[in-house]
Every structure is written in structure tokens, then in C-alpha cells.
Image (tube, rainbow, N blue to C red):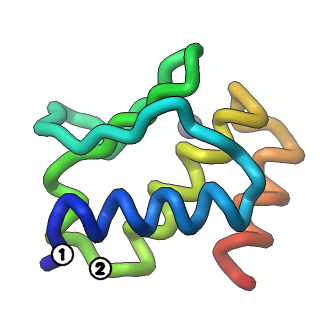
Amino acid sequence: MIDVSQLKEEVWRWARKIGVSPKEVHVRKMRRKWASCSSKGRLTFSYDLLAQPEDFRDYVIVHELLHLKYPNHGKMFKILLKMYLQG
Ligand SMILES: [Zn+2]
């Protein structure tokens, strides 16, 4: 189990690596979703992620950050998601 500040630190570390700049990063209680991304670049992550393993947190974080570049799940989105999670 990690805490909120650790999760946010992971998000900012990935953001630097990917080269995106979220406007805001929030962690709060969410229903049915692990994370969301507003059109204005505000990212929200679920508290439930704090108890998830690192591999899964990375997947959710990278997925959401890539939406700042690609709004949908097209070919480039999938290629980059795979690339970052392998590397
Ligand atoms: Zn998505």
C-alpha cells in the first residue's frame, strides 16, 4: 500500500518520462473507474489504486497520461502504451 503523495509522485515521474504536462493531478474516491482525464488536462485517479500492485498502477497511470496526447485508443496510443510499459 502506498499513500496519495507517492501515487502523485509516480504520476509526475511518468509525465516527465512521456513528455506530457497534466494541469492538475487528483486522487479521490471513484466508482467503476480507475482514473479519468478531462479535456482540460485534469487527471483524477482512484484511491483504490493505492492498494494495487506497481505493475497495475503503471498501466493505469501511463494509459491516462497518454490520453493527454491521444484522446482515443487508436494505433499510436496502443503502440506507445506497450512501449512505455515494457521499457
Ligand atoms: Zn482510455
Q: Secondary structure at mark 1?
A: loop
At 30% from the left edge and 39% from the top edge, which residue is drawn? Answer: 26
Q: Please tell me how crowded label 1 is: few (under 14), some (14-19), or many (20+) other residues with Cα within 10 Å.
A: few
Residue 58 appears at what percent x and percent y? Answer: 48, 69
**Direction right: furthest residue:** 76
Q: CA distance from mark 2 to mark 1?
A: 10 Å
N-term-proximal mark, 2 vs 1: 1
Amino acid type of the residue that numbered disc 1 sits on in the rendered structure: Ile
Residue 81 appears at what percent x and percent y? Answer: 71, 60
The residue nearer to you, when weighing 44 against 48, is: 44
Is ligand 1 within 8 Å of the beta carbon of the residue shown at mark 2?
no
Amino acid type of the residue that numbered disc 2 sits on in the rendered structure: Pro
Residue 17 appears at what percent x and percent y? Answer: 71, 66
At 84% from the left edge and 58% from the top edge, which residue is drawn? Answer: 79
Question: Quarter for ligand 1?
Answer: top right
Left or right: 16 as drawn, with respect to 77: left
Q: Which quarter of the rendered picture does the N terminus lie within?
A: bottom left
Q: Secondary structure at mark 2?
A: loop
At 46% from the left edge and 27% from the top edge, which residue is drawn? Answer: 42
Q: Is residue 86 above or below residue 80?
A: below
The reply to whether residue 37 is visible in this rendering is: no
At 22% from the left edge and 35% from the top edge, which residue is drawn? Answer: 32
- Residue carrying label 2: 53
- Residue carrying label 1: 2
Residue 77 appears at what percent x and percent y? Answer: 78, 46
The residue nearer to you, when weighing 28 against 16, is: 16
